[in-house]
Image (spheres, helix red, strand yellow):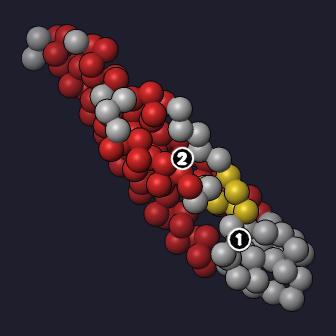
Amino acid sequence: MIEALFESNNYQASKKLMDMTVLRQEAIAANLANANTPGYKRVDIDSDFAASLKDALSGKSNEQIDNLSVNLAVDSLAPKTDATGNTVDIEKEMVLLSENQIQHQLESRMISGRMSRLRLAIKGGQ
């Protein structure tokens, strides 16, 4: 019974998305810290992650979700923002920071809600 709670696709996906938001937070922090560094290239979550997660969720095995890795990559689509070749747009990073915080809070609440239901079941509804 308990294994089913932690092995469900939704729970596994929430954990991977939580990992993604933590790594994206690090990427945004690095981007903001290097906004004035000549030649710095903006980094973000590897663009293949979203497609890989979607494919894994459509599969029947949690192993696919477990085997997904979240990685950072240089954002090759980011335009240069200055003559030195820096590709960090501070305003865009601040918007992404806000979006990432909201997504992290959502994933945290989903996981903690699952734990609360488990705690309630163990206590017998008390």
What secondary structure is found at the residue carrying circle 1? loop
- Tell whether 37 sits left or right of 123: right
Please identify the quarter of the rendering in which residue 124 is found: top left
Q: Residue at x 74, y 58 (%)?
A: 30
- Tell whether 24 sits left or right of 78: left
Residue tagged 2: 20
For residue 41, above or below residue 117: below
Q: Nearer the viewer, mark 2 or mark 1?
A: 1
Mark 1 is surrounded, within 10 Å at the Cα level, by few (under 14), some (14 to 19) or many (20 or more) other residues, namely: few
Mark 2 is surrounded, within 10 Å at the Cα level, by few (under 14), some (14 to 19) or many (20 or more) other residues, namely: many
Residue 123 x, y percent position in the rendering? 17, 11
Q: Nearer the viewer, residue 87 or 97?
A: 87
Report the amino acid beneath label 2: Met
Please identify the quarter of the rendering in which residue 14 is found: top left
Give the spatial CA distance, label 2 vs label 1: 19 Å
- Tell whether 56 sits left or right of 36: left
Residue tagged 1: 76
Report the amino acid beneath label 1: Ser
Residue 92 x, y percent position in the rendering? 59, 76
For residue 12, above or below residue 53: above
- Please identify the quadrant where the C terminus is shown: top left
Q: Report if residue 112 is visible in the image.
A: no
Please identify the quarter of the rendering in which residue 69 is found: top right
Q: Residue at x 36, y 48 (%)?
A: 106
Residue most extreme to the left: 125
Q: Who comes first in sequence, dot 2 or dot 1?
A: 2
Residue 11 x, y percent position in the rendering? 34, 33
Q: Residue at x 64, y 60 (%)?
A: 44
Q: Report if residue 69 is visible in the image.
A: yes
